[in-house]
Amino acid sequence: QVQLVESGGGLVQAGGSLRLSCAASERTLRTYTMGWFRQAPGKEREFVVAINLSGELTHYADSVKGRFTISRDSAKNTVYLQMNSLKPEDTAVYYCAATLGWSRVKAGRPTDFGSWGQGTQVTVSS
């Protein structure tokens, strides 16, 4: 069973930064492609970014390119999402997710990710 635990959300002013963390087991990080999604009130869950097993491949949604950075720390069994230059439209619940392989990542479909964390709220004030 894959268990993912997010942390690091909070309230920040526009232009500020936050770093989200997703803690997982060593086995999970050795097996799964990891991703972040977000869901704003009244909207569908949307893809944000993913990273492959080695960390050499990443794929970002256009809306966050140049502002967000995903990374993985094998020693700490954690995946990070560094979010800079935050905008009010980044306000959402952010979810960590896991999937096998890389081929379906670019489609950005939540249904292609089989394991999810509980989510962490990010609120960006204007």
Image (spheres, helix red, strand yellow):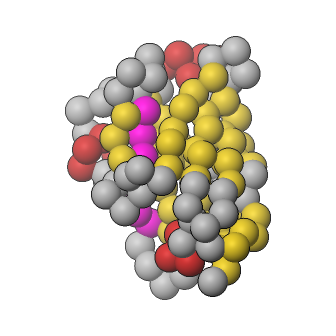
Comparing 9 with 3, the one in front is 9
Name the quarter where the C terminus is drawn: bottom right
Residue 77 quadrant: top right
**Magenta segment, prevailing SS (helix, strand or loop):** strand
- Residue depicted at x 31% and y 57%: 62
Name the quarter where the N terminus is drawn: top right
36 lies above or below 10: above
Which percent across, then down, holds residue 117?
63, 48
Which percent across, then down, holds residue 34?
48, 35
69 lies above or below 24: below
Relative placement, left or right, of 71 versus 125 is left
Residue 78 quadrant: top right
Relative placement, left or right, of 36 versus 124 is left
Which percent across, then down, holds residue 99?
42, 35
Comparing 76 with 83, the one in front is 83
Judge whether residue 120 can be spotted in this image.
Answer: no
Which percent across, then down, holds residue 89?
50, 76
- Residue depicted at x 54% and y 32%: 71
- Magenta stretch bounds: 45-51
